[in-house]
Image (cartoon, rainbow, N blue to C red):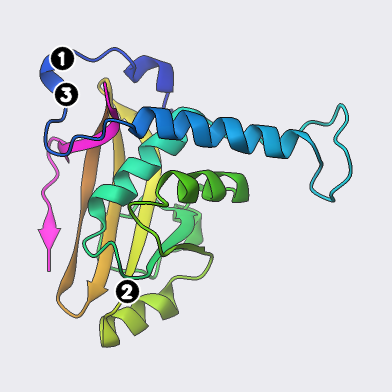
């Protein structure tokens, strides 16, 4: 089912995530997106003033969801963290040899910039990559970094769900299909989706 961010905005207070208070998460996302919009509105991609063609825009809810997932799945936040830009339906798994036909979407450069800005304090060495397999193998062999894979945002029975996993070395990693909810402090993972376990290595 296609994800509709407006369908997930009404949440009862009992579902609020109290695991990690993030008092400024919503404001951070809003400020980053406002700043990005202002910076993009002054010039087109070639540096010339933009006219009626407009500039790339980003969806605030989509940025908030993906920033929350990356923040929560990363285990060692001070290490370099690589995020694969392809959004694959099998992203919760441990294997990184995806057929790109199973990756129906990807993060645009504008979305990458917005997510990196939101996570600048939490994940300071964040980098988005278009090739993941070699990086995954190097991390598996040597450690010292993490690679995150993300899936498309899906709406399932009123829940916002995102498949995601990370690898941080030999016998180091985890993944699942995660439920992500908008709380009073911003988007946050509240646990695995019904029917999905969590693999941990």
Q: Residues within 10 Å of mark 3 (few under 14, many from 20)?
A: some
Q: Is residue 123 left or right of residue 29?
A: left
65 horizontally vs 183: left or right? right
Instruction: Check disc 1 and report the residue beneath it.
Output: 13
Residue highlighted by disc 2? 145
Position in image of residue 50 (x %, y %): 85, 35
State the image coordinates of residue 26 (x, y, percent, origin top left): 37, 28
Q: Is residue 169 magenta?
A: no
Figure quadrant of residue 42: top right
Tell me if I can see residue 55 in this picture: no
Secondary element under disc 1, as helix, strand or loop, is: helix
The numbered dot on residue 103 is: none
In the rendered image, the quadrant that contains the N terminus is top left
x and y percentages locating residue 61 in the rendered image: 43, 29
Residue 188 painted magenta: yes
Q: Residue at x 24, y 48 (%)?
A: 72
Q: What is the secondary structure assignment of the residue under circle 2?
A: loop
Q: Earlier in the sequence, mark 2 or mark 3?
A: 3
Q: Which mark is residue 16?
A: 3
Front-most of residues 63 and 174: 63
Seen from the viewer's position, the closer of residues 173 and 183 is 183
Q: Name which quarter of the figure residue 137 lies in.
A: bottom left
Q: Are marks 3 and 1 in contact (CB under 8 Å)?
A: yes
Q: Using the image, determine if residue 168 lies above or below residue 164.
A: below
Stretch of the chain drawn in magenta: 183-201
Q: CA distance from mark 2 to mark 1?
A: 36 Å
- Sort mark 1 into few (<14), some (14-19) or many (20+) by Cα contacts within 10 Å: few
């Amino acid at each position: 089912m296609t994800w509709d961010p407006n369908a997930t905005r009404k949440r009862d207070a009992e579902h609020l995530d109290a695991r990690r208070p993030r008092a400024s998460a919503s404001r951070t996302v809003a400020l980053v997106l406002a700043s990005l919009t202002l910076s993009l509105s002054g010039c087109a991609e070639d540096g010339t003033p933009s006219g009626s063609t407009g500039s790339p825009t980003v969806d605030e809810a989509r940025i908030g969801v993906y920033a929350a997932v990356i923040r929560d799945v990363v285990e060692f936040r001070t290490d370099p963290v690589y995020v694969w830009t392809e959004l694959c339906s099998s992203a919760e798994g441990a294997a990184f040899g995806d057929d790109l036909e199973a990756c129906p979407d990807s993060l645009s450069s504008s979305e990458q910039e917005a997510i990196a800005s939101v996570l600048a304090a939490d994940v300071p060495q964040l980098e988005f990559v278009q090739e993941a397999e070699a990086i995954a193998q190097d991390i598996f062999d040597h450690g010292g970094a993490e690679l995150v894979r993300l899936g498309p945002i899906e709406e399932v029975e009123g829940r916002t769900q995102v498949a995601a996993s990370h690898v941080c070395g030999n016998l180091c990693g985890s993944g699942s299909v995660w439920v992500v909810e908008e709380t009073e402090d911003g988007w946050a993972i509240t646990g695995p989706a019904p029917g999905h376990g969590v693999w941990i290595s």
